[in-house]
Amino acid sequence: MHMEAIQTPTTLDMPRRLFHPVTGVVSLTSLFKDVAEMLSANPDITIAYIHLPNSELVEDRFGWEAHEAFIRMCTNYLQGVSSQLRKDRKDCLLVHAFADDYVLLIPKQKDDETLEAMLSDGVMRHLSAMDHDLAAVSKIYVGLESLRAFSRVHNERLVYRGILEAASRAMDVGQRELMAQARVLDLVLKERNFQMHYQPIVTADTATIFGYEALVRCQADELRSPLVLFDIAERSGRTRPLNRALRDISVQALPDLPTAEHMFINLHVDDFTDPKLLDPPELMLSNSARIVLEVTERAAIQDFHTFKEHLDIMRSHGFLIAIDDLGSGYSALNTLAEIEPDFIKFDMSLIRGIDTNPVRQNLVRNMRAFADDLGVKVVAEGVETRGEYETVRDIGCHLIQGYYFARPALPFVRELEASAF
């Protein structure tokens, strides 16, 4: 039996593989015939469940194209492992499981407990070699379960039980690691072991500094990546204390900020229910006219009516509002029309390579025109080349942010990169 390709619902025999043959209810395993053949030839099987808990984080931060590349990288490595195991053991199955997870089934051997480390370490090495940024925010958890053919239990249900048990063990590994990282975060919060770096936001026409975005740099090695830091905070229920600490640290730099310049501070949607934000400290209030509160469009707003009311409270204090990472399509325009922010920031996935992509140029031009009608200023994020800068400037974006002008730094960058001019 050979099964080289990862099977997905589009390549399966749908009636036979995705639905239980008796009840017609959707089955969670599509392996019945293949595993039945494996069990008949090998009464003992090892199931390895490979769990990728951060695949959604990759998509949210880097976009769907990066997410697909991430999944392809993982798949390519696991297909190589599957091919080698098939040569060594005469049989092997590799399939997609739930979400972006995988299941590997092989004839059992005595040393199979080493598979857990081999698979998790191997996937991470493969990702690191292909894309360091994706590897930095990726986690791989592997759970193992042994399966023996049992005449009293239907093979399909037997395999289903085994997959669930292996999945549970993979999740347990992830949960233990999450709790360990949460303990590190608690210590970091207690010691305020953060630094805020500030990246200039530049006027498109004059290439002068309009303001800065405050970006966190955690000093603990385990949480050095901002993506990992916020992911751990959200999954462990520590988003609010983290964001409170970061706001406090950010505003401490306001006395050093020239009076004509603005500070952009990132917020989570949940922050708009935080009493300490709705009744801000004096240092924030006294500088409210030049503080821009950024809220990401991707964050889920559970109660839009309450969110809008609290947004209006912050506006009444004099704060400006920005929508960060604005995407494309109807949902983005609807978000813009409903919130009526002072600024919108186009996500770097729209801006990267825009100078050679007429479709993105037209999309950004139309969204910028819509923003102009509402009196909203547009910020193009992620500008890294002169071609990108000149394109977004000519399209009419009002403000520019990206490595082309300056990287985030401490203290405030006062001299922009010479190449920008």
Image (cartoon, rainbow, N blue to C red):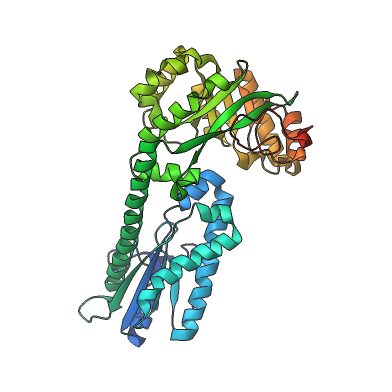
Residue 239 visible: no
Q: Percent from the top left, x then y, of residue 289? A: 53, 14
| Count of labels in the image | 0
Q: Percent from the top left, x then y, of residue 158? A: 27, 73
Q: Percent from the top left, x then y, of residue 162? A: 29, 70
Name the quarter where the C terminus is drawn. top right
* Vertical order, 378 against 53 (above or below): above
Residue 217 visible: yes
Using the image as rendered, state which of residue 100 and residue 315 is in the foreground.
315
* Vertical order, 355 against 365 (above or below): below
* Vertical order, 35 against 353 (above or below): below
Image-quadrant location for residue 26: bottom left
**Residue at the spot 35% in from the left edge and 64% down from the top edge:** 19
For this orientation, the residue located farthest to the left is 152
* 47 left or right of 288 in image: left
* 314 left or right of 415 in image: left
Using the image as rendered, state which of residue 275 and residue 63 is in the foreground.
275
Using the image as rendered, state which of residue 362 and residue 81 is in the foreground.
81
